[in-house]
Each structure stands twice: as structure tokens, then as C-alpha cells.
Image: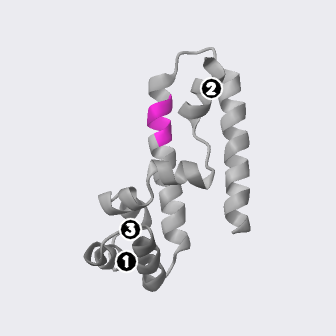
Amino acid sequence: MICYEWKKKKLRETVRGWVNYFKLADMKSYLKRIDEWLRTRLRTYIWKSWKTIGNKYRNLRKLGVTHVNAIRMANTRKGYRRSADSPIVKLAISKDLLKKAGYTFFLGYYLEVAA
């Protein structure tokens, strides 16, 4: 868990520094794309940290995925990046869930600072 907290802290520092430096530019559309990419990277990191099929299945079930879909995703032979970009994982590890977990995103911080 300490690794997650360290990642959140580093991400928060990077987002703040980057947005404060470029806040005068009109970059809303760019930040939307960067946030989509960042969420996929975070899902990839989380998916990879679950490691085993059993952990993937249990965690997907905890996040509300049906039994059949959890088995499908836990046993997939696709790579981490492609698995993290699947609709099942996107629904399980949603944007709202990542925000609730404490991750900071570029567009949200930009809208706070630029307003």
C-alpha cells in the first residue's frame, strides 16, 4: 500500500507543477486526452499489481463485475496494457473510483487553477 501512496504523491506533485507552469495556455482538449492516457496507465499499474488469476478475480468481484466477466478477464491471455483498456476493467476501475482513491488528474486541477 505504501507504493500506492508514493505514486499518488508523485502524481499530485507532477500534475500541480505541470499545470501551474502551462495554465495560461488554452489546453483543455489536450488535458482530456492526457487524462484518458493517464487513467489507462493507472489501470495498467493496478492490474499488474494484482498478479495472480485469483487476485484478479477476487478484486474484480469486489468492484462489482459479474462472475462470468470476472473469470473472463482474470484468465485473459492479453497483455497488461490491453487488459487495462478493456471495457470490463474500465467499468471496474472507473474514473470516479480513481478520484475517490485520491489520484489527481490534469483537467480537474487545471479547471480549479484556471478559473
> Residue placed at 58% from the left, 15% from the top?
25
Residue drawn 32% across the image and 62% down it: 88
Which label's residue is closer to the chain start, 3 or 1? 3
Query: Dot 3 corresponds to which residue?
Result: 64
Q: Main secondary structure of the magenta part?
A: helix
The magenta segment: 31-35
Mark in front: 3 vs 1: 3
Quadrant containing the C terminus is top right
Sooner in the amino-acid sequence: mark 2 or mark 3? 3
Q: Which residue is mark 2?
A: 112
Depth check, mark 1 against mark 2: the one in front is 2
Classify mark 3: helix, strand or loop.
loop
Q: Which class describes the residues within 10 Å of circle 1: few (<14), some (14-19), or many (20+)?
A: many
Q: Is 6 on the left-hand or right-hand side of 28?
A: right
- Cα separation between marks 3 and 1: 14 Å
In the rendered view, tell whether residue 58 sits above or below residue 33. below
Q: Which residue is mark 1?
A: 74
Which is more N-terminal, label 2 or label 1?
Answer: 1
Look at the numbered discs 1 and 2 and tell me whether their residues touch, using CB distance below 8 Å. Answer: no
x then y, percent, for residue 78: 34, 70
**Disc 2 versus disc 3: distance between alpha carbons?**
31 Å
Q: Secondary structure at mark 1?
A: helix
Q: Give the number of the mark in front: 2 or 3.
A: 3
